[in-house]
Image (cartoon, rainbow, N blue to C red):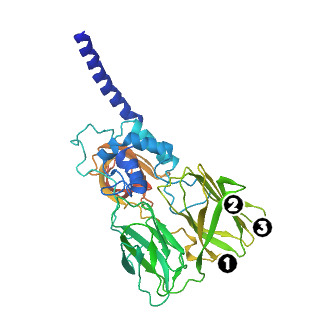
Amino acid sequence: MKGYLAAAAAAVIVGSSQALSHAQLTTTVQFDREIVRILDNHCVMCHAENALSFPLMTYEQTYVARWKIRQSALDRHMPPWAAVAGYGEFANDNALTQREIDFLVSWAESYGPRNNGEVFRGTTVHAPAKPIQARTDFEEWALGKPDVLLLVPANRVVDPKLRADRWLRGLEYKPADRRSVRAVSFRIQETGQWIGTWTPWHGFVSFPQGLALRLPAGSHLVADAEQGSVALYYAEKPSPRPLSNLVLEAKPASGTPRKLVATTKLTEDLNVLALEPALQHGVQSIEVSARTPSGATQVLLFARDIPVDWPTPYVYRRPVSLPKGTELTVVEHYGTDVASAAVTLSAYQGTPLALPADAPQPQQPPAATRRFELTGTVKSVDAGSGQLVVDHGEIPGLMGAMTMAYRAGPRENLKTISAGDRIRADVVVSETGSRLENIQVTRAPK
């Protein structure tokens, strides 16, 4: 019996080794390439040392959490973004694309290779000399050097000491303790006007270029959360249109306390910059729609499965212009009885301005472009598609030795390169992929 058990155990061990070896070949997704970019763009704002949740910076940290990551991505619980795609385009959208979800699932189910098929085996002896890991810089100011930097005191009232009216074009916040802060909303104390809301993945408020919010002389800013630092960015001249708030207070419809409705008709043209729902426990969905005088209906926001513990604004990439006479409607569904719930719109009135910022608003800075040196032999060249296949040695800090197809940079002339050439080049890695630049032939085939 003991011999049988020993043989069975040996078979399990051998079978596991064979299964692991086989599983490594089922995906081309690698931590050092696809996964680290997803972490940079969506995760490390919260998943870092001394931040809101367990760190996902290194390969080992991510490998250990791969099944949790896989399930959260499939369930769309993380990152916490409730707006349904197709109803509004938002500058602070942190949702994973289907392609990114597929990458995470494929990587997790294939034993999470670091690069070149190698997987974590409880030791880091096979790690690259300079291992790739996700990065974020909590000290960087996304909007540049602040005009004024102030502390948010314990009473949460910030005094910018304004002796005259100033025009605010942007605001950025850094919490004193990132382990406990999920969102911070800023308002003008004297008027109650909503300025904007900080979240870990979109840490600033930035109005379209040319627009600014008036801060009256002597006014104060109120933060609704913890202590920290707030940076103010002032415009050099007044805004051509004043920014204001429109608040829609949704209340139970027809005696049904679990369905809340608010409706208003616009008396002026309105250009919506952002929405802020005031979430109540039990919220299931929120829909904000606009019915124009022509009868067309546009859904400005449809959010469902909303995590109440992750309050977030919805900041449009471009102002949404609504003509006079448009009927705005908010419909909210709850699982419990609720007395009321408000949705605040940040907007300006009048015909749309031809703003220089008809381009998208500033985004959270992406991970920095990284460069590595490659030396290898060209296996094939397709000048028409701008690609070449290179058999190269280890690229320290990026990947092991392998044969791989690369896209050439826009300035590279592949017509001067042939199969068999020995080359040196820069591998440029960014959030959009990798490419070869500065390609030099060091030895032509004999």
Give residue 151's position: percent from left, percent from top: 35, 75
Q: Given the current orientation, which residue lies at the most extreme left position?
A: 125
| Frontmost residue, 437 versus 314 | 314
Q: Disc 2 and disc 1: Cα gap in Å? A: 19 Å
Tell me the number on the disc at residue 298. 2
Sort mark 1 into few (<14), some (14-19) or many (20+) by Cα contacts within 10 Å: some
Give residue 425's position: percent from left, percent from top: 33, 56
Is residue 222 placed above or below 181 in the rendered structure?
Answer: below
Is residue 427 placed above or below 187 in the rendered structure?
Answer: above
Tell me the number on the disc at residue 350. 1
Q: Secondary structure at mark 2?
A: strand
Q: Secondary structure at mark 1?
A: loop
Sort mark 2 into few (<14), some (14-19) or many (20+) by Cα contacts within 10 Å: some
Question: Which quarter of the figure has residue 249?
Answer: bottom right
Sort mark 3 into few (<14), some (14-19) or many (20+) by Cα contacts within 10 Å: few
- Name the amino acid, label 1: Gly
